[in-house]
Image (cartoon, grey):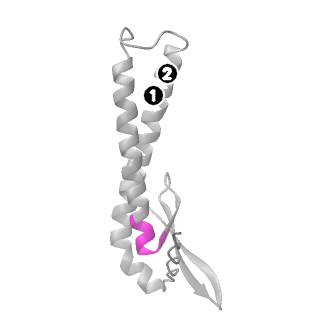
Amino acid sequence: MTIPAPAPAVRRFTVAEANRTLPLVRMIVQDIVELYTDLHRRRERLVALRNRQGQAQRGPSDPYEAEVIQMESELESDVERLQRYVDELKQIGVELKDPLAGLVDFRTEFEGRDAWLCWKLG
């Protein structure tokens, strides 16, 4: 029987702590926005290629099949890389809210209640 590890403590930032963290967060979020945008564009292209193929026989005789397989592999790899960026933010204690806009939250406490300091890239 495996005993689950306790959940990590939730980090709460002061405004000053959040501001000190911003240079690192900015770099990570910039990478997320760029990769997310690129992934979305490539995924749309892959769907278009698959739709163009339609019900046609896929296989060695299909001139697009090798490209499609390569695209799928690259997408999978980049999705994993995107997840590593998101995990890096989580390790810092920052929550990604919108990967397209570059919106993140820093949890804080205000008047004894949870609140969030929001920051958006740019």
Q: In this view of the protein, can residue 122 be seen by the observer?
A: no
User: Cβ–Cβ below 8 Å for labels 1 and 2?
Assistant: yes
Q: Main secondary structure of the magenta part?
A: helix
The extreme front residue here reads: 1
* Relative horizontal placement of residue 35, taking residue 14 as reference (left or right): left
Q: Magenta stretch: residue 50 in it?
A: no
Say which element carries label 2: helix
Q: Magenta stretch: residue 91 in it?
A: yes
**Residue positioned 53% across, 76% down in the render:** 7
- 3D distance between C-alphas at marks 1 and 2: 6 Å
* Relative horizontal placement of residue 35, taking residue 53 as reference (left or right): left
| Residue underneath mark 2 | 50
Residue 29 image position (x, y, % from top left)? 40, 60
| Residue underneath mark 1 | 46
Rendered image quadrant of residue 54: top right
Q: Label 1 amino acid?
A: Leu
**Residue positioned 49% across, 81% down in the render:** 11
In the rendered view, would you say 46 is above or below 117? Answer: above
Q: Nearer the viewer, residue 114 or 9?
A: 9
In the rendered view, would you say 4 is above or below 108? Answer: above
Say which element carries label 1: helix
**Residue positioned 45% across, 28% down in the render:** 45
Report crowding for label 2: few under 14, some 14 to 19, many 20 or more residues within 10 A (C-alpha): some
Residue 13 image position (x, y, % from top left)? 48, 83
Q: Label 2 amino acid?
A: Arg
In the rendered view, would you say 41 is above or below 66? Answer: below
The tag on residue 27 is none
Q: Which residues are magenta?
A: 88-94
Residue 62 image position (x, y, % from top left)? 39, 11
Q: Quadrant of the C terminus?
A: bottom left
